[in-house]
Image (cartoon, rainbow, N blue to C red):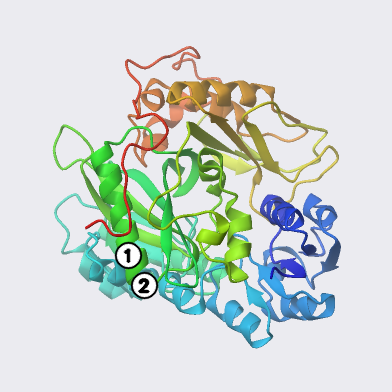
Amino acid sequence: MLFNKLLIANRGEIAIRIARAASHLNINTVSIYSNDDKSSLHVRNTDEAFQLDGNGVPSYLDIDDIIKIARESGADSIHPGYGFLAENAEFAKRCQKEGIVFIGPNIELLELFGDKGQARLAAKNAGLPIPAGVEGPVTVESARAFFNTLPKDSRMMLKAVAGGGGRGTRSISNSSEIERLFKRCQSEAKRSFGNGDLYAEQLIENAKHIEVQIIGDNFGNVTHLWERECSIQRKYQKLVEVAPAPFITESLRGKIIQSAMNLAESVDYSNLGTFEFLAFQSTQSEYDSFVFIEGNARLQVEHTVTEEVTGVDIVQSQIKLAAGASLTEIGLDADKPTIVRGYAIQNRINCETISDSGQIKPSTGKITTYCPPGGPGIRTDGFAYSGYETSMAFDSLIAKLICHTNSNSFLDAVIQSKKALKEFEISGVETNIEFHLKLMSHPDFLSGNVTTHFLDDHLPELIPNHPSVKQNSVPDKEPTRREGHGGVHLTTKDP
């Protein structure tokens, strides 16, 4: 039996996405909003809406207030979305104590993957390769000691134990930077996640970011929904996501997915999760090696591209699994992964300005025009509208543009995305739409010659008025993929 009423402990586009999924399942919905967020569109997209105490991000982190609203509204379930309290085990414990179902992985999994250092150990115990590192929490002294053990010219990553999305993360190339950047990471992590603990690991250079979507039920069954590539990042925050990964070998795809499955089975994974890897070249020929970097026990921002290529409504699946359904009952087979059709690309549309020097700042103001593109294969998950006033209090993401083509040509998906970006009309505030158009016209992007440092290396070329990138650039070759699926068949029984 599904739930009667679902409280969405989030805001913006993801709150709307969850509300739509619940509505399709005939579940009543409740939204929450801070004092300075009442004009956000998610407030209008639920059956009921309750105001939180206070302003800004802290309001959405107030467990006591959210639980109080859940009781007052009669909600019997809570979906945390992503960010805020999505991976907070204490929040899940409070829900359990109050008899409210937390829609997500169980408390043990939240605790495990909420501590990135412990997640590294779990991956290592499951036989996955991991970067050299210190599980943490580290101090300035222990981080410096680890840095001094790295090979010459190597860089170290300081990362928040409890976080994600690039917050509380810095790369360090010189020992003299450690104390300053440690304090900055610690402060950012504490502010964003309520936990300032950090861990350290060696930075893997020139790597592609590949992640696997894991989904499991409460009966010990787990499967995957294939992989995504998220190499286009800025300050460790993803900007463009693609499913499936278009420029990796089938051998590497199979090894990464099987490693993700091994980890998922070793920890008896339930509900939804994403395991992230870095793929790199151990030779000069191809990307043939990889390491596990972290697991996210929540719904990802980029779940959309996986939905488009698999046809699986991931949010509805989460809700059904939390209500006690098995994988089989929601149409998934633990021994036979779903078929992948075509390619999907997500562009994150942010309200921001990009100076001639590449300096990026949030753009605020009243949106005078908001007209997203439409048509077959084009989807926009957003929460803005004409007259909406953006706020510095929250993330600058205003919409996610997702384009899907059934074609096995990655270039077809790029063409679809570029057309949709050109049609997307937003005025009154500055956005990064032109930046995306430049990016998706770059020859290296089109030919798959990208790593997580792509934007750092090419930012001057991607500034909208920079003349160095031709809009009609085409690659020498494009990836090929067997018809109908990612080219590799895996089951949970494979070695």
| Rendered residue at 34%/74% (across/down) | 118
Please name the residue shown 44% across and 27% down the image.
460
Q: Does the residue at mark 1 contact the one at mark 2 (Cβ under 8 Å)?
A: yes
114 shown above or below 147: below
- Residue 238: give x, y in percent of width and height: 48, 45
Vertical relation: 309 (above or below) 331: above
Under mark 1, the amino acid is Leu
> Residue 150 location, x and y as percent?
17, 59
Nearer to me, 300 or 351? 300
**Is 458 on the left or on the right of 317, as rendered?**
left
Pick the residue in front: 15 or 193: 15
Residue pictured at 42% horizontal, 33% vertical: 484
Q: Which residue is mark 1?
A: 263
Residue 96: x and y, percent?
62, 83
From this viewpoint, which residue is outermost toward the bottom?
A: 97
| Residue hosting label 2 | 267
- Label 2 Cα crowd, 10 Å radius (few <14 / some 14-19 / many 20+): some
Circle 1: is it few (<14), some (14-19), or many (20+) Cα within 10 Å? Answer: many
Which mark, residue 213?
none
**Image: 347 above or below 25:** above
Image quadrant in which you'd find residue 131: bottom left
Q: Quadrant of the C terminus?
A: bottom left
Q: Could one spot residue 464 in this view of the protein?
A: no
Query: Which of 170/225 is in front?
Result: 225
Q: Secondary structure at mark 1?
A: helix
- Amino acid carrying label 2: it is Val
What is the spatial separation of the Cα atoms under label 1 and label 2, in whole angstroms? 6 Å
Q: Residue at x 81, y 53 (%)?
A: 45
**Can residue 171 be spotted in the picture?**
yes
Q: Is residue 144 left or right of residue 393?
A: left
